[in-house]
Image (tube, grey):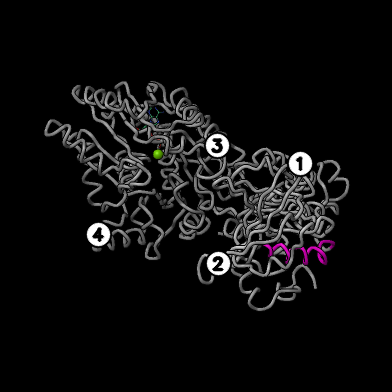
Amino acid sequence: MSLDSSIQYLKGVGPKRAAKLNKLGIYTINDLIYYFPREYDDRRKMKKIKDLINKEKVTLEVTVSGSSITLRPRKNITITKIPIKDETGICYMVFFNKPYIDKIFKIGDKIKVNGRVDISYGNVQIQNPIYSNLSDSNNNINTIMPIYPLTNKLRNNEIIKLIKTSLKTQLDNIDEIFTLDMRKDLNLISIEEAIKNIHFPEGREKYKASKYRIVFEEFLILQLGLFLVKSRLNENNKGIVFTKEDKSNEFLNSLPFKLTNAQLKVFEEIKGDMESDKIMNRLVQGDVGSGKTIIAILSILKAKTSGYQSVMMAPTEILATQHYEEINKLLHNFGVNCELLVGSLTQKKKEQILQMVENGEVDILVGTHALIQDSVNFKKLGLTITDEQHRFGVRQRAKLTEKGITPDVLVMSATPIPRTLAMILYGDLDISIIDELPPGRKKIDTYSVSDDKKNRAFEFLEKQIAKGRQAYIVCPLVEESENLDVKSATETYEELKILYGNKYKIGLLHGKMKPKEKDEIMKQFKENIIQVLISTTVIEVGVNVANANIMIVINSERFGLAQLHQLRGRVGRGEYKSYCILINKGKNKIARERMRIMEKTSNGFIISEKDLELRGPGEFFGVRQHGIPEFKLANIFTDIKILKIAQKISQDILTEDPKLELTKNIKIKNKVYKLISEKLNDISFN
Ligand code: ADP
Ligand code: MG
């Protein structure tokens, strides 16, 4: 038997158990050994009877102090109570439907008991406890017990037993990828120690060292894999060489403004990629309003000058349409033919456009997901652009790329993420950052207001509208949700319609509306037919209405800070002083701190870093979407310190040994290559 043996060969596993384990993703002994506990039940906490607190889990050392009583309150139900005592008091063990249990205990037996305390009517009980003789050393009472995440109808104890069995025979076989020297340098305990203690910790310190060891290894291997994939991509595949001569200077002269230094710097980086034979794989990160679209347009123009088509994908129809209009406006005079492909087009129009794209009559095709359908074929696609990348998965980005032969790839994101994370989430991309806003942007005054003062916020909003401005009201959910006490957009809409009556026109926009309806509402808002737009986060990205200068966010505590920051970027786009009012019900310290950050800071990068610090794991944004493999133990949010160390070490290793060819790195290399072939293929070769 080896680590790779099927779980079926493990002692105690028959076909039935094997099937259950398979459902947990456990197929081999190795899978089982790497099935880590979700949490631990520390049963070392010994207590005295007089100190027991209701509902806590405890371990007691007691003596059986009397004979058992069995009650039969109903047919088929028995309750057996056995009195136990220590020097501080007396209480009962209570067992349900185990009438035979009284045979096990004799008065005077000294035992250990572990279970949950139940105190009612002054009666102190330990319900369905586990127990053992004081002398019995082979018991689980006095230990830290692992609790496994999902058990799929297997009892936690069954899993524990199976893991113990497999560790007994296979622990020695687990591959140690680090040499002794490296382990000393990096302060890592051995993998055997770590695996053993992550399942059955001998104590707190051992547990910490084990977790560190395993998490570090996971991060290191992934980061090395991503770095290697990137360098291999750059090395092996030759991309399109776009001509140095382009019309970018003429184009820049035609603009009513000058590019910021940050924009110029980023376009230089893109130009470098495009003019070289390296396939561009570049992420442009820039705060809301930093002017990413112009950068995309410059790249499109450059591709066109070399005779290549471009494609640009945006997450919503509204945004795609806006890009389409902007590109048309700015590039029309440069002989660039732009078309829009979105779901709401008529079949006839769609076919017409697709035909033109295939013939090469369209230079830049802008659209939504519709772009990745099989029916979309280009004559000579040279550049793919994905806007607001965080809304798309790696797969979708790859699908777009497959429509050309080694096209250059540009990804744009307004979700500024800390560099540490970007290196993991976009490990396969080069990163350019636009860290400067165009001059003249006014700070958006941001105020956090508690829910009971929201009327004043709405009064303020009305004043702005009376001055001729327009307003956004953002709500977190579309449908009414009683439990969550969340004001839905629809509900707010109905309320305000009554409040503002026929003085102003109010519009409603949410994700469940048909694209046509959405477009109509947006159009009316742009034309100031609608003064107050109530919406969910569908307006989050890109929407540009210069006359709108105030935004109220309802239940703002429910949003991520990065998201609030993006939403806020919808105002402050024109000449008027702009406001963002965050109405919130958040009462705890963290909620208040989060709102304070929004009031104080207008730099998206700082905001997202703080958001990460404060919220830790979870909802920061959909990590899974990014296509990085899931970790067994590591968490890119809570283990960020270890991630940083692993990133530094992975760079050190590759500096010394770029292809991992040194003997001391051989085992690391094997593990990295295994990961690449199993998990990173999507990223590397599409
Ligand atoms: P984002 O980075 O959020 O996508 P956009 O590309 O939509 O930002 O740009 C926001 C607005 O700023 C647009 O109206 C655009 O024309 C304008 N803009 C872009 N660059 C500059 C600049 N250098 N100076 C002044 N205005 C600019
Ligand atoms: Mg944009």
- Judged by depth in the image, the label closer to the viewer, 3 or 4, is 3
The residue under label 1 is 652
Q: What residue type is labelled 1?
A: Asp
Q: How many marks?
A: 4
Residue 162 x %, y % = 73, 67
Q: Which amino acid does label 2 sit on?
A: Arg
Asked if the residue under mark 2 is in contact with the one under mark 1, i.e. CB atoms within 8 Å, the reply is no
In the picture, measured across the screen, residue 500 lies left or right of residue 630, that is: left
Residue 295 x %, y % = 44, 38
In the picture, measured across the screen, residue 531 lies left or right of residue 477, that is: left
The residue under label 3 is 612
In terms of sequence position, does the residue under pointer 2 or pointer 4 come before the other? 2
Asked if residue 396 can be seen in this view, the reply is yes
In terms of sequence position, does the residue under pointer 1 or pointer 2 come before the other? 2
In terms of sequence position, does the residue under pointer 1 or pointer 4 come before the other? 4
In terms of sequence position, does the residue under pointer 3 or pointer 1 come before the other? 3
Residue 418 x %, y % = 57, 36
In terms of sequence position, does the residue under pointer 3 or pointer 4 come before the other? 4
The residue under label 4 is 349
Circle number at residue 72: 2
Front-most of residues 206 and 618: 206
